[in-house]
Image (spheres, rainbow, N blue to C red):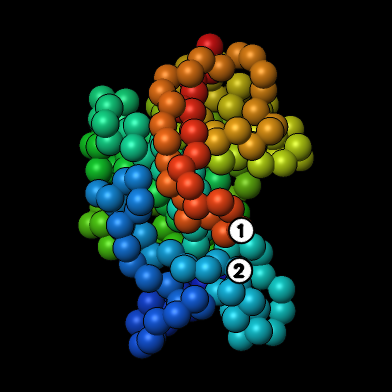
Amino acid sequence: MKGAAAAALSELEREIDAPGTGLDRLQLAPTPFVPEVRLHLAEDAIVWWARMEAFAGHPLSPPYWASAWAGGQALARHLLDHPELAAGRRVLDVAAGSGLVAIAAALAGASDVLANDIDPYAVAAVTVNARANRVTVDTSGDDLLDGDVDDADLVVAGDVFYSRPMAERMLPFLRRVVASGAEVLVGDPGRGHLPADGLRVLADYPVPTTEPSVDPSPRRVRVLRPA
């Protein structure tokens, strides 16, 4: 684990071991739509973010890893309900956040799982969450989107079309993955930057959400595969 991720891991481990509860604390709890997986989540990620920035004395990236995003929940549910998609395969979870989908792939019997995220706190969160679920998940903090993937059989991507700049980088990457012969699964709750065509819907789930500043009622989330 590289320096920034190692430092973030030490901070998260301190947070997890700290006594007390409240909106600015992390709590280990079952994921709403995937109770088989427990995650260290913030009851209010924005409050947690503000406290950690004050502690650090400098800006930090938004803690996307501290919430169970709807697209990731749907993908994780789909893998656990259809373990043949991951069993015995090398799986890459790109923009992994909390590592929910990577952990589900490991529980479904994947031979190797790599969770990738450029946020060192996300890399640290994957580490502590995988440990909590007693599975092995490798991590990477490198930016993979401009390269090729030749060591994965399945690439999973949840909630990655949340902005135009991200979509403009993610789409070519996923197309290269498909061209290499690997399979791609996408989980998306209709964030607005998903391509209108070229994807086949495999499943549609009503997913509860722990996302900050979002209506907590269930959202319709699709699991898709490039056609």
In the rendered image, the vertical position of residue 145 relative to residue 35, given as above or below: above
- To which quarter of the image does residue 188 belong? top right
Q: Which residue is mark 2?
A: 46
Q: Which residue is mark 1?
A: 213
The residue at 51%/15% (across/down) is 200
The reply to whether residue 117 is visible in this rendering is no
The residue at 42%/51% (across/down) is 99
Q: Nearer the viewer, mark 1 or mark 2?
A: 1
The reply to whether residue 142 is visible in this rendering is yes
Callout 1 secondary element = loop
Q: Nearer the viewer, residue 43 or 184?
A: 43
- Give the mark count: 2
Q: Amino acid at mark 2?
A: Ile
Q: Amino acid at mark 1?
A: Ser
In the rendered image, the vertical position of residue 76 relative to residue 66, given as above or below: above
In the rendered image, the vertical position of residue 178 relative to residue 214, given as above or below: above
- To which quarter of the image does residue 64 belong? bottom right
The residue at 53%/11% (across/down) is 227
Q: Position of residue 37 (x, y in %)?
A: 29, 52
Mark 1 and mark 2 lie on one chain; the one further toward the N terminus is 2
Q: Nearer the viewer, residue 4 or 119?
A: 119
Dot 2, how many residues are within 10 Å of its Cα: few (below 14), some (14-19), or many (20+)? Answer: some
Dot 1, how many residues are within 10 Å of its Cα: few (below 14), some (14-19), or many (20+)? Answer: few
Left or right of 130 in this view: 146: right
In the rendered image, the vertical position of residue 105 relative to residue 120, given as above or below: above
Q: Answer yes or no: do the residues labelled 1 and 2 have beta carbons within 8 Å?
A: yes
Q: Position of residue 57 (x, y in %)?
A: 69, 84
What's the CA distance linking mark 1 and mark 2?
A: 9 Å
Callout 2 secondary element = helix
